[in-house]
Image: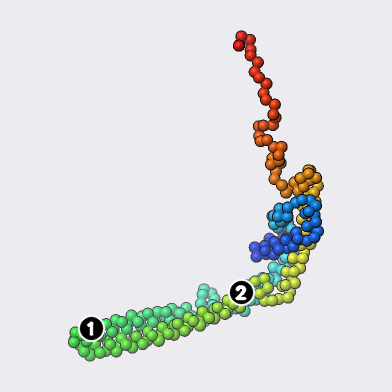
Amino acid sequence: MGRPSRLGDEDRSDYASALDEVIASPEIRRLLERSGVPGDRLRVRGLAAVARTAAAADAEYRRYTALRLHAQGGLRDRGPRPLSGPGDQERPGAGVLAVLGVLTPVLAAVAAATFLLLGYGLRLADTLPALADTLVGVGWFSLVVAALAALVSVVALYRTAARQSAADAVTVPGPSADGSPALARAREAWLVALRDRGIRPFLLQELAEAASAPGAGEGRGSRFSSPAFAGPDYSGPGFEGSTPPAPRQPGPGRP
């Protein structure tokens, strides 16, 4: 058997929930009251030992993660593919059409403003009336083209946004996004194995060691308490005794 799988970040909440369920069981609660170990300290030790306890249900966890990856891959395959992108295009030229849809209204509006300004300027100066009429006509035509292109671009953007929103709503990833009964059973089997073979034996061992630790009769749960230097008999370094030093005897010839 290979190295145990590392518990993924998306499964940490399930592990914490399973740990809380075991701690809340009547057996563990009875042992906690008997040993005097605080429940929150026991929970902290259970969270810190996630690698050790999760390894007991490694086979079930491997099966669960394999089914989940397979389900998420199937959902991604069923989702719509983007219109453009490197190596993932649905039809050639989609990016060019998008660029033209944005640039056409802008260029047509700039051309319309230029032709209208020149045409009406020539009319005000009363010079080249034929050219002025032509420029004014071309300007109004460019303005109509700009308005139509802008309308088409807005409609296309709205349809693209609506299609993308619907695709995101359908392909939201999750542990049981496809509602697969096999995936739900695999997850439940992993949680049962995690509670029965991993978390529960670890907590029982911790409580047994705490109950059999030296001084457990007076201060229970010493395994979960602060170090020995926090006790009431500790007086700090360099102050081991309370006997004062002997007075210095005067030597010969000294007062």
* Quadrant in the picture for residue 249: top right
Q: Is residue 57 visible?
A: no
* Quadrant in the picture for residue 115: bottom left
* Residue occupying the point 29% across, 89% down: 137
What coloring was used for the rendering? rainbow
Q: Quadrant of the C terminus?
A: top right
Q: Which mark is residue 121?
A: 1
* Residue occupying the point 24% across, 85% down: 120
Residue farthest along the top direction in this orientation: 253
Type of amino acid under label 1: Gly
Q: Foreground: 16 or 194? A: 16
Q: Foreground: 20 or 104? A: 20
Q: How many residues crowd around disc 2 within 10 Å: few (fewer than 14), some, or many (20 or more)?
A: few
Type of amino acid under label 2: Val
* Residue occupying the point 78% across, 53% down: 33
* Residue 56 locus on image (x, y percent): 76, 60
Residue farthest along the left direction in this orientation: 126
Q: Which mark is residue 230?
A: none
Q: Quadrant of the N terminus?
A: bottom right
- Determine the secondary structure under disc 2: loop
The residue that mark 2 highlights is: 172
Q: Is residue 216 visible?
A: yes
* Residue 118 locus on image (x, y percent): 25, 83
- Determine the secondary structure under disc 1: helix
Q: Foreground: 28 or 94? A: 28
Q: How many residues crowd around disc 1 within 10 Å: few (fewer than 14), some, or many (20 or more)?
A: some
* Residue occupying the point 20% across, 85% down: 124
* Residue 238 locus on image (x, y percent): 66, 32
Count numbered badges in the picture.
2
Describe residue 17's horizontal placement relative to residue 100 as left or right. Answer: right
